[in-house]
Amino acid sequence: MTNNAEIQSVKNRFGIIGNASALNYALSIAVQVAPTDLTVLITGESGSGKESFSKIIHALSTRKHGPFIAINCGAIPEGTIDSELFGHVKGSFTGAIDDRKGYFETTNTGTIFLDEIAELPIGTQARLLRVLENGEFIPVGSSKVKKTDVRVVAATNVNLIEAVERGRFREDLYYRLNTVPIYVPPLRERGYDIDLLFRKFSSDFAEKNHIQPIELTDSATQLLMNFRFPGNIRQLKNIAEQITILETDRLVSAEILAKYLPREQSSGLPTLLKGMNGGNDGGISERDLLYKVLFDMRKDMTDLKKLVLSLMQGGQINPEMMKQHSELFNNIHQEESVALVPQSMYGPGVANQFQPYQPVDNDRFIKIDDIQDDRDNIEDITHETQEDSFSLEKQEKDMIIKALKKNGFKRRYAASDLGISERTLYRKIKQYDIEDE
């Protein structure tokens, strides 16, 4: 295992700031794998410094005297990426007026860093797999196989396992790339490294612009380290440079620092759930969300019935149709009375509107969560007739069947479409005795 002295030497050489254990572990893996020719997959959030690791691996490898090139796969148009990577011959497509060498040919004996590897088209992924397995590729428009000796280091901020399951990334390519995985921790997981990096960025920027560096008070330092930094190191550097150039007072308090930190950070929740959180970290349960959707559908159906009924009564539709389907309109008023959001979600008597979630503490209301599955109690609080309850269950069952069919009976994707967990979907499938093909 790489010792601390080696890790510190690498930090000094490549300007790596920080002492977080997760960072040190990632560096130790990079140092160990560098002398080999193994393919490396670097994962981590955008802005966490993945490209720096690719440069470390190349510089410490036996290929250090060969070429190194970094390519952002997401920045190259799909129609030209094969040409960029593997080259093309004259006349292979409109605009190909000469033969052109691709990056895998020009980087022979060196290292190629493929950033945002998940953005590669499926066809290009197949070509890349051949390079990794045999060192062979064919330029666009050519029939001649060429050889290359290139080490590939790839990086992504996407969960490739999920991409494989959705059919957006080749499974064989994933396992071929993931020979040695390196996880680069996000800034929020690096503790006091945030303060060290802030001082470094501020000092470098101040020296470059011939001004005095700034200092943070203890409260400002604590505020900085508590910030989540969704933009990671890039965001921290931008904030440090802004404060250094704009603040006249060289001692920055927490109040001043707060002006430069975005007040609203993304929660990672869907837009629908953000407005329903209501300050409760637990938010709204998946079960409640499903019932919200079902009751909204029921209200829409009631409104549609009222519209059709008014048209029939006005003579705009054949009256015989009204007689033939009179049972559809007999319970309109009854449906209106129960077309409220379930009491377990918002409390009694709240109309079917999207209101902020408020937990119900009164014992006479029944709360619905992921553990409770008592449909008799649900009937009690909504005061529906047995027929109405069965109607609601039928709607729920129909929705589940449609979601399963739409997603080829893959429960994970069906559960995602329904807004419920896979465990809850499995329970519903068993409850309604749905054939899970």
Image (cartoon, rainbow, N blue to C red):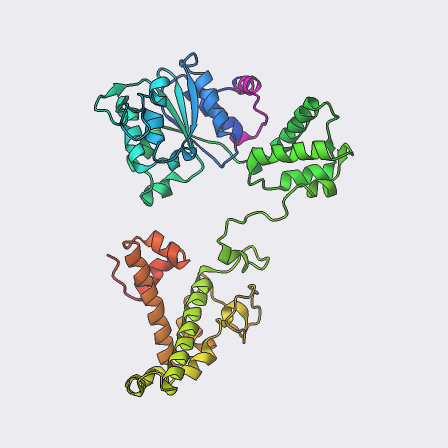
Most foreground residue, 236 or 397? 236
Residue 217's image quarter?
A: top right
Q: Is residue 140 visible?
A: yes
377 left or right of 252 in image: left
In percent of the image, x 33 and y 39: which residue is there?
Answer: 169
Considering only vertical position in the picture, is 343 above or below 66? below
In percent of the image, x 34 and y 58: which residue is there?
Answer: 426
Residue 124 placed where, x, y %?
31, 33
**What type of secondary structure mainly makes up the magenta span?**
helix
Q: Does the magenta stretch include residue 17?
A: yes
Considering only vertical position in the picture, is 202 above or below 341? above
206 left or right of 308 in image: right
Q: Is residue 174 magenta?
A: no
Considering only vertical position in the picture, is 180 above or below 275? above
Residue 297 placed where, x, y %?
41, 69
* Magenta part of the chain: 7-22
